[in-house]
Image: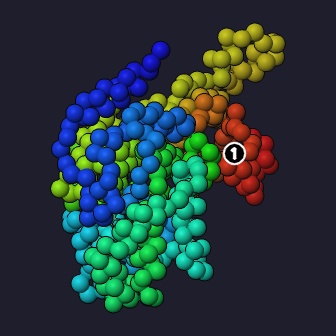
Amino acid sequence: MISPIYTYLQNLHATYADLHDGQVASYIPELSHANPNWFGICVATTDGHVYEVGDARQRFTIQSISKPFVYGLALEDHGKDAVFSKIGVEPSGDAFNSISLYPDSGRPFNPMINAGAIATTGMINGEHPAEKLQRLLGMIGVYCGHPVEVDQRVYESERSTGHRNRAISHMLRNFEILTDDPEPALDLYFQQCSILVTCRDLAIMAVTLANGGLNPITGQRAVHQPYVEPILSIMSTCGMYNSAGEWIYDVGMPAKSGVSGGVLAVLPGQLGIAVFSPPLDTRSNSVRGIRVCEDMSQDFNLHLFHAPVVAKSVIRTSYSASQVMSQRSRRDHEEEILQEHGHRIRVYDLQGDLLFSTVEVVLRDIMERHETLDFIVLDLKHVTSIDTTANDLLCDLLHTLESQQRMLLFSNIERSSPFAMSILGREDSDGSL
Ligand SMILES: NC(=O)CC[C@H](N)C(=O)O
């Protein structure tokens, strides 16, 4: 039996296989050999499933899609402030190869245009060029889940013709954004753009970002979680160059395109999408890539701002202990105690992800009732995650209730979870959950 999702993707592929608009990039001579009919669509989920349609396993060079990932590596190497001091985060509204530098400082507007990307690559740590390249290949390899390599022909082709990028790199040197000889940074940039990937790889790279930096297939961490947000933010505002505004308006997902015809899009927490089709529009984005992403976003309601309302469903049920107890046969003395005190015990059966807006609902309900209660039990059996904000708010609640001589208890908490550790780790806790 074929999944309706797979059938949908096959139909989408068939529809746009007939669209022959656009031109294969030729300014890097080697790219002009691409077959304009190559066309793959892949969707990867955060539990590691990949739907593949068409030329999902055709290899091609990653080109500009490498930029957000290398930006992540630069953030890991130097932190946000140091990177920000050299490369801005403002959309330029200009083409990918524009020389969009702040006039006084020479700082590139953002890391997605070539100027910003070359500056970013120039920040990658390593003793010598070979080590830097190995680090870069290693990082992309973790995202893809297998070792990757440089296509030497494409690399040589760009290196010998990339005069504009060479000019940009020397401009960056002039402004001391690059502080050494610009040639090695430029060379590494050409190599990073020539890394071979497939459409399937791109979908897995995208879903790794959707999954907080953890490759859901291998379980390996590709980037530290705190840097996923800046990477996705930059992709949202600058990933599609001079069509970034239209893209976020219509498609509504952080994305990145490259001149070899790849496009990837990330729906945080949910999906990674990739399309490969070499013919490009006038803004150097894959024609079919854009159409496929637009359709998928509309048909599946994937626009980021079409957000599910999470807060309504956090409390599965809440009940007073007297209600439960009377339903079960108890020994007489238990029954007595519960009849007397049960109404002062309230159990909250919670579900889903605990984050600010879901914990807020729980806190408010408890605050409204706390005067009538002695014990509040939060049953976490159906809770799937607790973020740090929810964790802190629950710890604060524990303190507040304690100061009012009321007790907050947790049931079905995993003792090894970070939440349990932070509760157990409290200095004044007796450790009894
Ligand atoms: N948009 C792109 O994919 C451009 C990457 C290409 N290597 C360049 O620098 O021109």
Q: Is 178 located above or below residue 270 in the figure?
A: below
In which quadrant of this rendering is ligand 1 seen? bottom left
Q: Residue at x 33, y 42 (%)?
A: 38
Badge 1: residue crowd in 10 Å (few <14, some 14–19, many ≥20): few
Pick the front one: 218 or 423: 218
Tell me where residue 8 appears, x and y as whole percent.
34, 25
Whether residue 81 is visible here, answered yes or no, is no
Q: Amino acid at mark 1?
A: Ser
Taking the image as shown, residue 161 lies to the left or right of residue 379, namely left
Taking the image as shown, residue 360 lies to the left or right of residue 161, namely right
- In the picture of the structure, the residue carrying the numbered disc 1 is 417
Tell me where residue 236 appears, x and y as whole percent.
33, 55
Q: Residue at x 53, y 26 (%)?
A: 316
Pick the front one: 88 or 385: 88
Res 406 quadrant in image: top right
What is the quadrant of the C terminus in the image?
A: top right
Tell me where residue 320 appears, x and y as whole percent.
61, 24
Pick the front one: 53 or 268: 53
Q: Residue at x 74, y 54 (%)?
A: 425
Q: Residue at x 69, y 52 (%)?
A: 422
Taking the image as shown, residue 74 lies to the left or right of residue 87, namely right
